[in-house]
């Protein structure tokens, strides 16, 4: 335990908010809001169901964050050499057993809330929920952890894109539509880009500890190009689905963030230093947040103003 751990130790509430990475829960809300906005347009929005989905998804994400810290800690991926922000487990403010238990408490609470969602929906809602819980746990859990076998980006794309957006929409409208999946793709791609920016930053560290991410498979140069492609596709898909008539013109408000995307590309392109690449990760996270907010705003703007 660090020497100043007790002196500067925050309150229990602050510790647990850090442990569940409270700020990251905001980005998890974006696909829920997107699915809700699409349900509103299609006249299938249900307020109580929507609120329950928000609570359930945030609980699953909080639990997954706790499991992620627990398994990374035990697998040596979250040590003092990591550039990731110190979490309460690494700082000695929480024991590993408490973090693990906290993850299960969040999952059980999410399952209870999910029971209500299923009761007003049908069995397919259960499928969405089970897939979300499994992917959240298996992301870093067990010896076959997805994030340790080059499947992190794909997992994040599925969860933050089609799974949450379509699951939210279906729980209220109770019909599966292709246009919902298409609208989920851009934010899913951008979320995958954020994770890839993190893995690019951690490439040397992950390679040293034997963590196999997509970045360690590809190497620095190809990993950078993958990041550029993911960012470009996020915008390209949005424009294409608008041209095809599957999303409103107001969704193209996301194009306002193009300069930030270009700045991210420029920063990443000019350096191989993990510390500077950490700034690129920060920019990509800001980009994800602004892109998502504008996307959701565009959907709701269409509903109220039909533009």
Image (cartoon, rainbow, N blue to C red):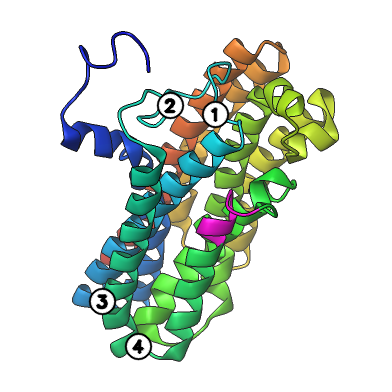
Q: Local crowd at mark 4 within 10 Å, few (<14), some, or many (≥20)?
A: some
Q: Nearer the viewer, residue 45 or 29?
A: 29
Q: Local crowd at mark 1 within 10 Å, few (<14), some, or many (≥20)?
A: many
Mark 2, residue position: 90
Give me the disc on residue 121: 4
Q: Position of residue 183 (x, y in %)?
A: 53, 63
For label 4, the SS is loop
Q: Position of residue 263 (x, y in %)?
A: 58, 20
Q: Report the residue at 27% width, 62% height from top.
A: 55
Mark 1, residue position: 78
Tell me how far mark 4 sits from mark 1, CA to CA.
Answer: 40 Å
Left/right of residue 95 with respect to residue 15 in the rendered view = right
Q: Report the residue at 59% width, 52% height from top.
A: 139
Tell me how far mark 3 sits from mark 2, CA to CA.
Answer: 37 Å
Tell me how far mark 4 sits from mark 2, CA to CA.
Answer: 41 Å
Tell me whether the residue at label 3 lies in contact with that at label 2, contact meaning CB atoms closer than 8 angstroms.
Answer: no
Q: Local crowd at mark 3 within 10 Å, few (<14), some, or many (≥20)?
A: many
Residue 153 vertical position relative to residue 181 in the rendered view, above or below: above
Tell me how far mark 4 sits from mark 3, CA to CA.
Answer: 9 Å
Tell me whether the residue at label 4 lies in contact with that at label 1, contact meaning CB atoms closer than 8 angstroms.
Answer: no
Q: Report the residue at 52% width, 57% height from top.
A: 137
Q: Local crowd at mark 2 within 10 Å, few (<14), some, or many (≥20)?
A: some
- Earlier sequence position, callout 4 versus callout 3: 3
- Earlier sequence position, callout 1 versus callout 3: 3
Residue 189 vertical position relative to residue 86 in the rendered view, above or below: below
- Earlier sequence position, callout 4 versus callout 2: 2
- Earlier sequence position, callout 4 versus callout 1: 1
Give the extent of the magenta segment: 135-142
């Amino acid at each position: 335990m660090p020497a100043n751990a007790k002196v500067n130790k925050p309150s229990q509430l602050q510790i647990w908010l850090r442990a569940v990475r409270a700020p990251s829960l905001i980005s998890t809300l974006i696909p829920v809001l997107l699915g809700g906005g699409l349900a509103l347009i299609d006249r299938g929005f249900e307020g109580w169901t929507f609120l329950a989905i928000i609570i359930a998804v945030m609980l699953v994400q909080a639990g997954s964050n706790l499991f992620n810290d627990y398994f990374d800690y035990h697998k040596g991926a979250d040590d003092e050499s990591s550039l990731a922000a110190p979490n309460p487990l690494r700082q000695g403010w929480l024991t590993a057993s408490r973090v693990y238990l906290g993850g299960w408490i969040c999952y059980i609470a999410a399952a209870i809330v999910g029971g209500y969602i299923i009761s007003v929906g049908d069995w397919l809602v259960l499928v969405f929920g089970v897939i979300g819980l499994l992917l959240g746990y298996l992301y870093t859990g067990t010896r076959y952890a997805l994030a340790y076998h080059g499947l992190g980006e794909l997992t994040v794309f599925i969860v933050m894109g089609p799974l949450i957006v379509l699951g939210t929409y279906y729980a209220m409208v109770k019909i599966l539509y292709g246009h919902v999946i298409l609208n989920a793709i851009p934010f899913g791609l951008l979320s995958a880009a954020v994770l890839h920016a993190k893995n690019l930053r951690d490439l040397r560290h992950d390679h040293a500890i034997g963590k196999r991410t997509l970045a360690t498979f590809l190497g620095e140069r190809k990993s950078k190009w993958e990041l550029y492609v993911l960012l470009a596709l996020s915008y390209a898909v949005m424009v294409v689905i608008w041209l095809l008539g599957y999303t409103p013109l107001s969704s193209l408000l996301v194009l306002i963030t193009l300069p930030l995307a270009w700045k991210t590309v420029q920063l990443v392109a000019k350096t191989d230093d993990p510390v500077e690449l950490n700034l690129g990760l920060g920019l990509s996270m800001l980009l994800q947040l602004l892109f998502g907010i504008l996307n959701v705003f565009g959907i709701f703007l269409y509903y109220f103003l039909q533009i």
